[in-house]
Amino acid sequence: MLNIRPYLANREKFEALWHGLATSKDDLLPCLCIKVDKTNRYAMTLIAGENSIPVFSEPENALATDYLATSEEMWQQTSLRVTYAPSIYGRAPYFGVPFHQAVEIALKKGVSKSRFYLPETFQNGRHSSLLIQVDRKDDANSQLQLQAWEYSIGDRHARYVHALSNDFLSNVSHLDGAIVHFSESDLETHLNRSKKVKGTGYKKYFRIDGNIEIAHAHNIVKRFFQSDLYSEAFEVESLI
């Protein structure tokens, strides 16, 4: 677990530097004074003369910040809202393991289930969630089968993806995406008891048969799903 106490002690120093460097009425810091360490998930350091302090993107802007940091030209033209401590909110596993470990478990034991959720989205006993099930199909090819459901709070449906692969490392041999509608009781069973239910309706939106590079598969599914849970659950940080 991340210990944020050392970062919290930096608050006064951060505020002093921020007051000296913040530009415009929006209270943003120019990225010209923020050094990026691209070897450490874009860890950032605010530098002002002889003073320096670790800084972090606000969680609402983390993905955009990571993308801006890939281009020196864009970075030099940007000002950002940053803070002195990493957020304690965000994505979290409810049960199970990330995708690559789930694949290893399915190869050994036949099936693995995981659920990730957004803690801050709690409403009426539910969270926005991403459920993942990996199992070995009982057929001649004995491929691994991925099923994933993304549920957004307030909805009675889930975005659903199904894929087949030998190992989910190099390519997939099939990929399709759909939206599944649930009754209240089915949704409760599916989300809180982790039991697969067919739902009350099913509409498919795409299907691909044939070898697809794993990077392309991740790109397609990440764009079909809509929450920030994908990178956490599937351990995908950079996509083509």
Image (cartoon, rainbow, N blue to C red):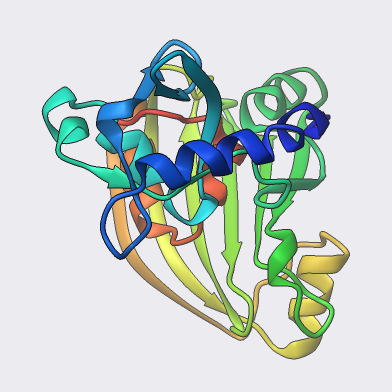
- Residue 240 in sight: no
Quarter of the rendering containing residue 11: top right
Percent across and percent down for residue 3 are: 82, 29
Give the total of numbered labels.
0
In front of the other: 74 or 139: 74
At a point 45% along the width and 47% down the height, the residue shown is 19
Up the image or down, 117 lies above or below 15; here it is below
Up the image or down, 12 lies above or below 167; here it is below
At a point 74% along the width and 78% down the height, the residue shown is 187
> The C terminus is located in which quarter?
top left
Residue furthest out toward the left: 73
In front of the other: 188 or 78: 78
- Residue 99 in sight: yes
> The N terminus is located in which quarter?
top right
Quarter of the rendering containing residue 211: top left
At a point 33% along the width and 63% down the height, the residue shown is 26
In front of the other: 153 or 47: 47
In front of the other: 52 or 83: 52
Image-based side of 125 in relation to 166, left or right: right
At a point 82% along the width and 62% down the height, the residue shown is 195
Percent across and percent down for residue 60 are: 48, 56
Quarter of the rendering containing residue 102: top right
Percent across and percent down for residue 198 are: 66, 72
Percent across and percent down for residue 17 are: 48, 36
Residue furthest out toward the right: 193
Image-based side of 112 in relation to 218, left or right: right
